[in-house]
Image (tube, rainbow, N blue to C red):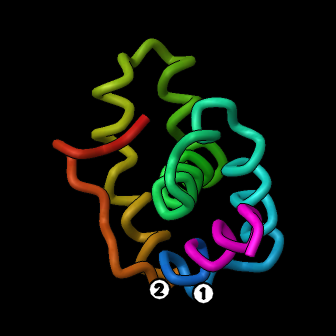
């Protein structure tokens, strides 16, 4: 298997009900991000999922634009993010103390 296939497999495990277009975006981000290049496929998949949800499916960026600091913005979108993870069938949730960037 190549890296794409390993990451796709990890995304399917971490978010089995992720919609197809979001699956593609998450996978492409995990592969294209310089910061995730050396991460394990599971770590790259998870961080990409979390980043995608935060930036595309919550008001996180709007909160930052409104002057909230990163920690506050993350606090306010945490429940929404975990709600998406639940909808996508993810066995994992984000806790405030371990939320990745």
Q: Secondary structure at mark 1?
A: loop
Q: Quadrant of residue 16?
A: bottom right
Secondary structure, magenta segment, majority class: helix
Q: Is residue 22 above or below residue 55?
A: below
In the image, what residue occupies the spot 49% across and 64% down?
Answer: 42
81 or 59, which lies in front? 81
Say whether residue 87 is left or right of residue 22: left
Q: Mark 2 and mark 1 in contact (Cβ < 8 Å)?
A: yes
In 3D space, how far apart are the residues under numbered discs 1 and 2 (Cα atoms)? 5 Å
Quadrant assignment for the N terminus: bottom right
Percent x, y for residue 79? 33, 59
Neighbours of disc 1 within 10 Å: few (<14), some (14-19), many (20+)? some
Say whether residue 30 is left or right of residue 39: right
Say whether residue 99 is left or right of residue 96: right
Q: Which residue is mark 1?
A: 17
Q: Which residues are magenta?
A: 1-10
In the image, what residue occupies the spot 73% across and 70% down?
Answer: 23
Q: Secondary structure at mark 2?
A: loop
């Amino acid at each position: 298997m190549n890296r794409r296939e390993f990451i796709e497999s990890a995304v399917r495990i971490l978010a089995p009900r992720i919609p197809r277009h979001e699956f593609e975006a998450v996978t492409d981000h995990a592969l294209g991000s310089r910061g995730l290049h050396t991460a394990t496929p599971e770590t790259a998949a998870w961080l990409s999922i979390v980043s995608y949800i935060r930036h595309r499916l919550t008001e996180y960026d709007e909160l930052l634009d409104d002057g909230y600091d990163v920690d506050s913005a993350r606090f306010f979108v945490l429940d929404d993010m975990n709600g998406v993870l639940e909808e996508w069938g993810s066995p994992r949730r984000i806790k405030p103390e371990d939320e990745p960037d």
